[in-house]
Image: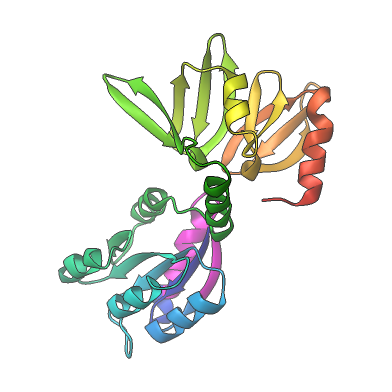
């Protein structure tokens, strides 16, 4: 996720940049801006997925900048940051993702970033292409959990692993057990997931690298996931081709 930091005060910008560097996840600094006009210009000229922006700034303030940014296609998400709580209602009327009050705590910033869970621009483009190519296909997987129904968007899934008659869905927020076959899921989402083993599929967008495992075999590294999964020799060539192609 490419993040633009916007504040007219340099120390405030540097604090947010430092907090971002301390948070684990696929977060990358897209740039910095010192006012709303510069922020809008950067959003139009630079790939930006999310904007962390102060409200009170000279010239174009954060609220008005957020409104202009919302008209960019595709629009970056916006999280507003300010020392004044009275702007909260106006902020949410502009459909911002969250509203943080200074001084921002690292835990609160991390919570806002995780809640946003905004697909990057390439991911949004891929999702649009996917939906056009597969009309009617599910956009999420669901399972009954603690008396309710838990739903996980397909783009949040990291890998699928067969265990007996169930499939464990490992996603960005945890795990989910679904009563479906791995083969059926592979057939439905073959363009989004790649088989690495007879009992595992991984999201193509999460594939990062191959490395040697402790047992001498090959394991796959996945973005935003500390787990390493074994790769069977049968599927190794397919994974190498995918990684060489540089497809996100």
Q: Residue at x 62, y 27 (%)?
A: 186
Q: Residue at x 37, y 65 (%)?
A: 78
187 above or below 97? Answer: above
Question: Is 127 in front, or is 10?
Answer: 127
Left or right: 14 in relation to 46:
left
Residue 89 seen in the current view: yes
Q: Is residue 196 left or right of residue 71?
A: right
Q: Position of residue 242 (x, y in %)?
A: 76, 43
The type of colouring in the image is rainbow
Q: Position of residue 144 (x, y in %)?
A: 34, 20
Q: Nearer the viewer, residue 221 or 129?
A: 129
Q: Is residue 217 visible?
A: no
What residue range appears in magenta? 13-31
Q: Is residue 186 magenta?
A: no
Q: Is residue 93 above or below residue 6?
A: above
Q: Which quarter of the figure has residue 159?
A: top right
User: Is 28 one of the magenta-colored residues?
Assistant: yes
How many discs mark residues in the rendered view? 0
Q: Please give the name of the residue rendered at 74% of the width and 30% of the height, measured from the top-left corner.
A: 219
Q: x%, y% of residue 221? A: 68, 38
**143 to 190, vertically: above or below:** above
Q: Is residue 235 left or right of residue 80?
A: right
Find residue 203 and report its image quarter.
Answer: top right
User: Where's residue 107, x and y in %?
Assistant: 36, 51
């Amino acid at each position: 996720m490419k993040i633009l930091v916007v504040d007219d005060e340099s120390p405030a910008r540097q604090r947010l940049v430092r907090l971002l560097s301390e948070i684990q996840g696929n977060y990358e600094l897209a740039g910095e801006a010192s006012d709303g006009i510069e922020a809008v210009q950067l959003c139009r000229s630079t790939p930006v997925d999310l904007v962390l922006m102060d409200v009170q700034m000279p010239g174009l303030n954060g609220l008005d900048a957020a409104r202009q940014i919302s008209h960019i296609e595709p629009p970056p998400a916006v999280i507003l940051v300010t020392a004044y709580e009275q702007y909260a209602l106006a902020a949410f009327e502009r459909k911002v993702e969250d509203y943080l009050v200074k001084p921002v705590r690292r835990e609160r910033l991390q919570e806002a970033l995780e809640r946003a869970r905004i697909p990057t621009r390439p991911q949004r483009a891929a999702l649009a292409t996917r939906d056009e190519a597969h009309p009617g296909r599910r956009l999420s997987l669901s399972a009954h959990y603690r008396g309710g129904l838990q739903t996980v968007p397909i783009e949040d899934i990291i890998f699928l692993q067969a265990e007996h008659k169930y499939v464990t869905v490992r996603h960005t927020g945890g795990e989910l057990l679904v009563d479906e076959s791995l083969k059926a899921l592979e057939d439905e989402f073959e363009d989004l997931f790649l088989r690495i083993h007879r009992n595992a599929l991984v999201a193509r967008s999460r594939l990062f690298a191959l490395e040697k495992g402790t047992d001498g075999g090959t394991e796959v590294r996945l973005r935003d996931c500390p787990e390493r999964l074994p790769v069977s020799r049968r599927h190794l060539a397919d994974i190498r081709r995918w990684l060489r192609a540089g497809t996100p």
